[in-house]
Amino acid sequence: MWNLILVNKDKSLNMFILDFFKQNNKIENKDVSNKTLLYKGAYKYGHATYEYVNSKYFRIFNGKFSYKYTYQTRTKTKGEEIVAGNYTNNKKTGLWEYKCHEKNMKRNLKVEYIDGIQSGVYEYCRKGGFYEFEHDDNETYISTVMKNGRPVGKLKAFICNSMVVGECDLSGYPDGTWYMDMANDKKHLVCYEIWNHGLLDEYYYIDTTTGNRYDEKMDIFVKIECFIKYECYPIESIIKKGSTRWHGDIISR
């Protein structure tokens, strides 16, 4: 609010000054409309369509969002990045789908969010390989449920020709028996880790060709973290705005 003291004896000049400050005061205190608007156009490397409301200095994403980027791959073929989801007050909310499709490979990630934090479905699947010599029917995946950015409940994955199965408690700590079957990876090993709410009680692996047991740790979680870091995290990062991203870490005590 302007505080103005008039000392000029010229009434017409005083009226002019008063009118000037009133007009500027109206502009300064003008309320920003909360009407939902629609944007269609360039965004990052591609194009986006999204709903938003204006604030004084920036847009607040609020509603549907979609993004598409078409590019040329290393082999001179067409590739596409497609993202779709919803924002609430600049935070990702509900189910988001991320797709990265090329000629010999299709990668799909589904993530549910609450206030921009992973809470709900977390599913990734890759069909085909990064290189032409990899078979089109090669499938890699991970599936779990997230809560406050941490996996909870059952986790199942097939990564680097190894099947991984385990479970986390409601606080995100590994619990119960985790195993990693590497029999398809020409190593013929099955690895076990026995957890008690984040505390590792026992670990060993079995050579399936001999049946011998070895009390050595094979770091199941390292394999999961590397997989998330190099396959899932980059896709979720196509659109970073309004969310955290899981790095693949599974916490222990």
Image (cartoon, rainbow, N blue to C red):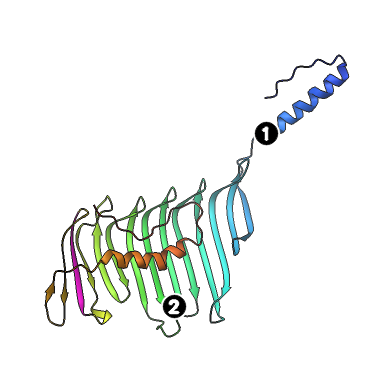
Horizontal side of 204 relative to 150 (left or right) equals: left
Residue 14 is drawn in which quadrant?
top right
Q: Main secondary structure of the magenta part?
A: strand
User: Compared with residue 198, is residue 158 higher up or lower down, i.e. above or below?
Assistant: below
Horizontal side of 45 relative to 163 (left or right) equals: right
Instruction: Say which label, 2 or 1, has the lower sequence index.
Output: 1
Q: Determine the residue positioned at 45% across, 84% down.
A: 132
How dense is the environment of label 1, judged by Cα within 10 Å: few (below 14), some, or many (20 and up)?
A: few
Q: Which residue is mark 2?
A: 130
The magenta stretch spans residue 194 = yes
Q: Secondary structure at mark 2?
A: loop
Residue 105 is drawn in which quadrant?
bottom left
Write down the region rendered in magenta: 188-196
Q: Secondary structure at mark 1?
A: loop
How dense is the environment of label 2, judged by Cα within 10 Å: few (below 14), some, or many (20 and up)?
A: some
Q: Determine the residue positioned at 76% across, 26% down.
A: 21
